[in-house]
Amino acid sequence: MNEYEKKLKMHIDENNVDCEHLVFQKSCHSVEEAAETAGASPEDFVKNICMSDSEGNIIVAIVKGEDRVGSKRVAKALGIERPKTALPENILQKTGYPVGGVPSFGYQAVFVVDERVMEKEFVYTGGGSPNSLVKINTAELLSANGGIVARVRK
């Protein structure tokens, strides 16, 4: 386990998050790679799209793997100006995790979960590194990140 995976595992244990933390030898960076590596369906995966508001706060829009995030929809859901896509160095600084491994919980951010995600019983999300995943019940995911549910997909 690398430092990012260990940090997420510690957060999971300390906060009693009911999930499976899975670490692989192969990359899980894209939805396709992750599905192949985990032996699961691409429909079971979510993406964490990191954005920042006008004050530099991190916003994480969580959508199903096949969906795209609409920044106008995120702005409407949160009652803010349209957020900008966060830069990779800002993502690491603000979340504590590298692009390709950012989890859907475990750090300070505003989380917005697309309503289609909540239609699934469980999902796979980033596990802290490009070689790890978390399998989690969607209700537990929402509890773990304290997010809101709103339509944020295009």
Image (cartoon, rainbow, N blue to C red):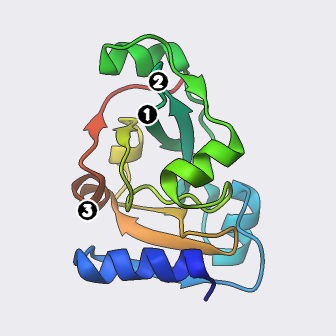
Q: Nearer the viewer, residue 23 or 11?
A: 11
In front: mark 3 or mark 2?
Answer: 2
Mark 3 vs 2, N-terminal side: 2
Tag 2, which secondary structure?
loop
Q: Give the alpha-carbon distance from disc 3 to disc 1, as whole Å.
A: 24 Å
Q: Would you say 19 lies left or right of 27 here? A: left
On the image, the x and y values in percent for residue 121 come to: 34, 59
Tag 1, which secondary structure?
loop
On the image, the x and y values in percent for residue 33 come to: 76, 64
Q: Would you say 64 lies left or right of 122 here? A: right
Q: Which mark is residue 57?
A: 1
Q: Give the alpha-carbon distance from disc 2 to disc 1, as whole Å.
A: 5 Å
On the image, the x and y values in percent for residue 10 come to: 38, 82
Q: Would you say 25 lies left or right of 43 here? A: right
Q: Give the alpha-carbon distance from disc 3 to disc 2, as whole Å.
A: 26 Å
**Quadrant of the image for the C terminus?**
top right
Residue type at numbered disc 2? Asp
On the image, the x and y values in percent for residue 66 come to: 63, 41
